[in-house]
Amino acid sequence: MKLLEDRILNDGDVLGENILKLTFLTHQVDFELMREIGKVFAEKFKDTGITKVVAIEASGIAPALYATEALDVPMIFAKKAKNITMNEGILTAEVYSFTKQVTSTVSIASKFLTPEDKVLIVDDFLANGQAAKGLIQIIEEAGAHVEAVGIVIEKSFQDGRALLEEASYPVVSLARLERFENGQVVFKEADI
Amino acid sequence: MKLLEDRILNDGDVLGENILKLTFLTHQVDFELMREIGKVFAEKFKDTGITKVVAIEASGIAPALYATEALDVPMIFAKKAKNITMNEGILTAEVYSFTKQVTSTVSIASKFLTPEDKVLIVDDFLANGQAAKGLIQIIEEAGAHVEAVGIVIEKSFQDGRALLEEASYPVVSLARLERFENGQVVFKEADI
């Protein structure tokens, strides 16, 4: 997605060996770009019968919300910690975040997913694939079908994509980071 | 906001004495309702010169995002934990959540707020006002002006609104819960 790649080149900060700071996605959100991202995902998946988009709090919510708007389906966002209003029928998975260096419990109330559901997972970053793997586990435990994993930015030098594709989950990434060179991003060809 | 009150009556689950579970806001998000909420906030504040909307992850993001879209300004969402890509110029405040029974550190990168900014805070729930108070502290530390606090659902039987109004911050709530009676919500008159 050219618009996204241009924005990464203009606004991304490469920090250290493999960390890219993209505040337009993770902190001060550019809703126009998020809306375009949502439309691109929706266009790609419009003929696949998606019934739900599943995201993970917090940075995944904005792009996923616009994807749900464009697909006209509900968005479920997986919670990173249980709270006292989530008290029954909760499916959970453990997810380790290398960026935050913590293990979270992600959870979805099972009543929101049925065997009739075809799910598109949307997440902001794909690195080691742990978040997507946790979401897939939960969605399948509920009997629903994971149609594909839509990723805004894939760190192609990490093994998340391989992990998901080997397990036969299609991955569609709008930008794919091949490597960092002299503090700048070098892209692989994106899926859209 | 009639549409929101009707939805609360239809879909809300009253759990115990003062807990209301509203999954259309906090888990399976109804984007159409969120978009209407965003428009209502924007209509209310369209002549006040708002330059930024500040939300707090995670359930505040969807209504805030649509408010920013309708106001055509950026949204900043305060982070609940620092991660290793947020490494400089971070303003923080401690916020205790009675629902989750944990203290979080909320943070915003100071470079996104300037003394020229007029900020609308948007949050999903107002109970004790601790989250709003933390956000106000951060925003003012950056020198920016807090124009108002926009709340989707106010628990009027708790003291958050009084706390904010006594400190001269206008509160605009789309639904105000006066009390729960026989497992059903009784509303106070809302601000919009």
Image (tube, coloured by chain):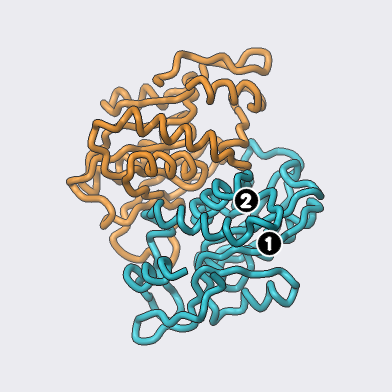
Chain colours: A orange, B cyan
Badges 2 and 1, same chain: yes
Q: Residue at x 49, y 82 (%)?
A: B178
Q: Looking at the picture, does residue A180 appear above or below residue B65?
A: above
Q: Kindly identify which chain the residue marked by label 1 belongs to.
A: B
**Residue pointed to by mark 1:** B134
**Residue pointed to by mark 2:** B78
For mark 1, give the secondary structure: helix
Real-space CA distance between mark 2 and mark 1, rounded to the nearest whole angstrom: 10 Å
For mark 2, give the secondary structure: strand
Q: Determine if residue A34 is in view.
A: yes
Where is residue A91? Give x, y as percent: 31, 53
Q: Residue at x 73, y 55 (%)?
A: B138
Q: Quadrant of residue B166?
A: bottom right
Amino acid tagged 2:
Ala
Q: Kindly identify which chain the residue marked by label 2 belongs to.
A: B
Amino acid tagged 1:
Gly
N-terminal label among 2 and 1: 2
Badge 2 local density, few (<14 within 10 Å), some, or many (20+)? many
Q: Residue at x 64, y 69 (%)?
A: B171
Q: Quadrant of residue A168?
A: top left
Residue lying farthest bottom? Answer: B181
Q: Quadrant of the C terminus of chain B?
A: bottom right
Q: Quadrant of residue A12?
A: top right
Q: Residue at x 39, y 53 (%)?
A: B32
Residue lying farthest left? Answer: A116
Please indicate whether residue A176 sits to the left or right of residue B73 in the image. left
Are the residues at dot 2 and dot 1 in contact (C-beta closer than 8 Å)? yes
Q: Determine if residue B29 is in view.
A: no
Q: Looking at the picture, does residue B5 appear above or below residue B26?
A: below
Where is residue B152? Give x, y as percent: 51, 65
Where is residue B91? Give x, y as percent: 74, 50
